[in-house]
Amino acid sequence: MKLQANVGTLDRVLRIAVGAGLLSLAFVGPQTPLGYIGVVPLITGLFKFCPAYTLFGLSTCPMERQG
């Protein structure tokens, strides 16, 4: 089963940046376990798929041309 990408380029870049930033809080800075929340946006950005977008019928990917 192949998942259809629903995360566009700008959304993807922001997710990866925010995810990496949050994840860094678990290792540097305040070293809080809450930084592990950054795994979620990081993974959704890397795989170009967000399950929450599917639930709400959203997509930030550009529409594909037909024909």
Image (cartoon, rainbow, N blue to C red):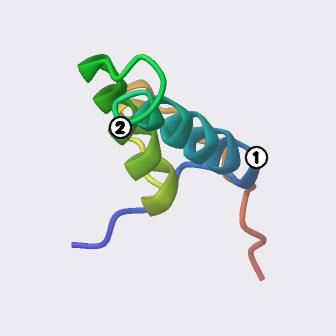
Residue at 51% over, 43% down: 20
Q: Nearer the viewer, residue 33 or 9?
A: 33
* Residue 18, position as x, y percentages in the image: 58, 34
| Residue located beneath label 2 in the image | 40
Q: Is residue 46 left or right of residue 59?
A: left
Residue identified by numbered label 1: 10
Looking at the rendering, which quadrant does residue 67 occupy? bottom right
Q: Nearer the viewer, residue 31 or 48?
A: 31
Q: Position of residue 11 (x, y in %)?
A: 67, 42
Q: Residue 14's spot in the image, x, y percent?
A: 67, 39
Q: How far apart in space, not on screen, are marks 1 and 2 (Cα)?
A: 17 Å
Q: Residues within 10 Å of mark 1 (few under 14, many from 20)?
A: few
58 horizontally vs 31: left or right: right
Instruction: Give the SS element for disc 2.
Output: helix
Task: Write down the quadrant of residue 9 in the picture.
Answer: bottom right
Residue type marked 1: Leu
Regarding residue 5, the answer to whether it shows in the image is no
Of tags 1 and 2, the one toward the viewer is 2
Residue 5, compared with residue 31, is above or below; it is: below
Q: Is residue 32 left or right of residue 17?
A: left
Q: Which residue sits at x=55%, y=34%?
A: 21
Q: Nearer the viewer, residue 34 or 44?
A: 34
Q: Earlier in the sequence, mark 1 or mark 2?
A: 1
Hey, which quadrant is residue 23 in on the image? top left
